[in-house]
Image (cartoon, grey):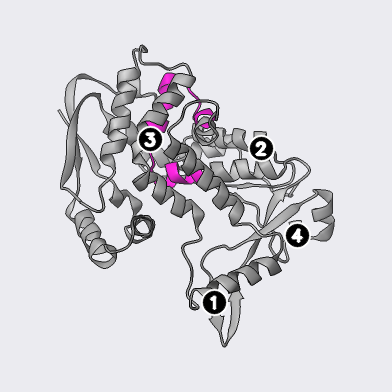
Amino acid sequence: AMGRKNITEEKIKEANDWAAARKIDTTTELIFGLPGESKKTFLSLLDRSVKRGFDNILSHNLILLDGSELNREEERTKHNFKTKWRLPGPNYSDIDGKFVTEAEQVVVGTNTFDYDDYLHIRTHNFFYYAVYSLRFFRWFFKSLQSVDIAQADFFDAFLFPDKNKNWPIDYLNYLKDLKNAFEGELYDTEEELIKDMEAKFRANNNEVLAPTRLNSLYAARLIYMEQSWIKEVLEKHLNDFGFKSDNPKWKTIQEVISICLKERINLRNTKESSEPIITMYDYVAWKETKFRLPLEHFKLKKPAKLNFAIDDVQKERIVSFNKEQGKMKDWGFFYKAQDAIVPRSQLLFKLQIES
């Protein structure tokens, strides 16, 4: 529909295999909202991207840019584009007494999907960013293939749980805040956005307001401030998929969850290491092969110690960040840490197998 030509499945596999052999990460960036796309087809595309072995999977919403072919009137009519406006970031200020801001027009509906579908995919967009870019519980989600649960299905269940079931209230509140944020960032017209942002900017003494990059903001909250309910919620969802505590693999999945909880460095109270885990699996080798095979392929002949270590560079960066930003409130502190401490692998303990 767009006149673009994608590379073949064979080329994708060849590139990913070449990169994997050299321990080079690969990334795919996808756009939701293109002509002919639907919620179902895009979720299927995300699932295929996982199975193809990409290390990073990023999805974006279609933006109609001035001068682009899809922004022509005949194309907008043909595909029945419905759009709203949002800020691309904190790119606004006062210049010579005039308020100026960037704004982007995003597609929130077409012939093949509606506004509710847009919000659904917008939420998945966020979660793939949290898991693949910020490594939120990546070990756990990669282990799902070992218990025959499709990652895309688990993501969907986690983000849109059955409200008739008994979930932790903090979990439901987080999802509610997330949905409100994604709806709240949208304006019907560019003029409405500019008027509202100028009013907020002036009321804030001509200073930029709180962060507007919602993916980073809510990922920071999820990773660092919502830990009290994560384990319980993951286990309840596993039960809903038919994977229960009497399953022989239950203990292994519990171990994987423990790794996810231990590998994240406490930025407020940084320690030299986290308590090791005695394991029967070589998680380091599993990671080095980009999780392409089920975890069972990396079972050891005898128990080994999985250590969590921090190097001097990591420690120095985290200590330095605390000196500069330590007085900030938690949400802003963790949000900013994700940008200041790079690469983001520096936010995690390094895993080492000791036989």
**Amino acid marked by disc 2:** Lys
Query: Which type of secondary structure does the marked residue at label 1 adopt?
Result: helix
**First in sequence: mark 3 vs mark 2:** 2
Q: How far apart are the two marked residues, 1 and 4, measured between alpha carbons?
A: 32 Å
| Crowd class of label 2 (few under 14; some 14 to 19; many from 20; radius 10 Å) | some
- Which residue in the protein does label 3 denote? 230
- The circle drawn on residue 116 is none
- Which residue in the protein does label 4 denote? 71
Q: Are marks 2 and 1 in contact (CB under 8 Å)?
A: no
In percent of the image, x 55 and y 41: which residue is there?
124
Residue 253 falls in image quadrant:
top left
**First in sequence: mark 1 vs mark 3:** 1
**Amino acid marked by disc 3:** Ile
Residue 257 falls in image quadrant:
top left
Looking at the image, is 44 positioned above or below residue 110? above
Examine the rendering and report whether any part of residue 205 can be seen. Answer: yes
Query: Which type of secondary structure does the marked residue at label 2 adopt?
Result: helix
